[in-house]
Image: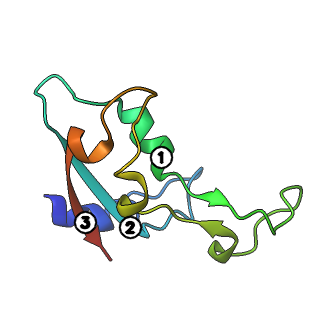
Amino acid sequence: MLNLLPFAYSHTSSVIRTMVDVRHVHVVQHTDAVGSFSDFALLDALTPKRKPEFDASKPSESADEYHFPTWAEIEPTPPRAGRRNFKELGTYHDYAL
């Protein structure tokens, strides 16, 4: 099932998201059955950020205008202040395309 994730959006396009392409699939398993970290904190940490050298008031022209965080960058950081880091809270699996 996890190997199908890269193809999920291309086969379920809709009117509001016609041009969604999966660039990378990150899968993190919680170390605790009830959840060891906030899913929203993980999504926020892995969300692409626009590079400062590009004008934020203008529409993007390519993916090159964004920095795509990697697991290696976020694993030593805690999802919330004073907490253990992502590496201690979950097991990471990389499904790079």
Residue at the image point whose x is 36% and y is 62% from the top: 72
Q: Name the residue under label 1.
A: 45
Q: Is residue 54 left or right of residue 19?
A: right
Q: Could you say which is closer to the camera, residue 22 or residue 95?
A: 95
Q: What is the CA distance from the residue labelled 3 to the residue labelled 1? A: 16 Å
Q: Name the residue under label 2.
A: 24
Measured from the top left, where is residue 43 in percent x and y?
Answer: 44, 43
Q: Could you say which is closer to the camera, residue 42 or residue 62?
A: 42
Residue 75 shows in the view? yes
- Circle 1 packing at 10 Å, graded few (<14), some (14-19), many (20+), is many
Q: Is residue 37 left or right of residue 55?
A: left
Q: Which of marks 2 and 1 is nearer the N terminus?
A: 2
Q: What is the CA distance from the residue labelled 2 to the residue labelled 3? A: 8 Å
Q: What element carries label 2?
A: strand
Q: Do the residues labelled 2 and 1 touch (CB within 8 Å)?
A: no
Q: Residue 94 carries which label?
A: 3
Residue at the image point whose x is 30% and y is 31% from the top: 37
Q: What is the CA distance from the residue labelled 2 to the residue labelled 1? A: 14 Å
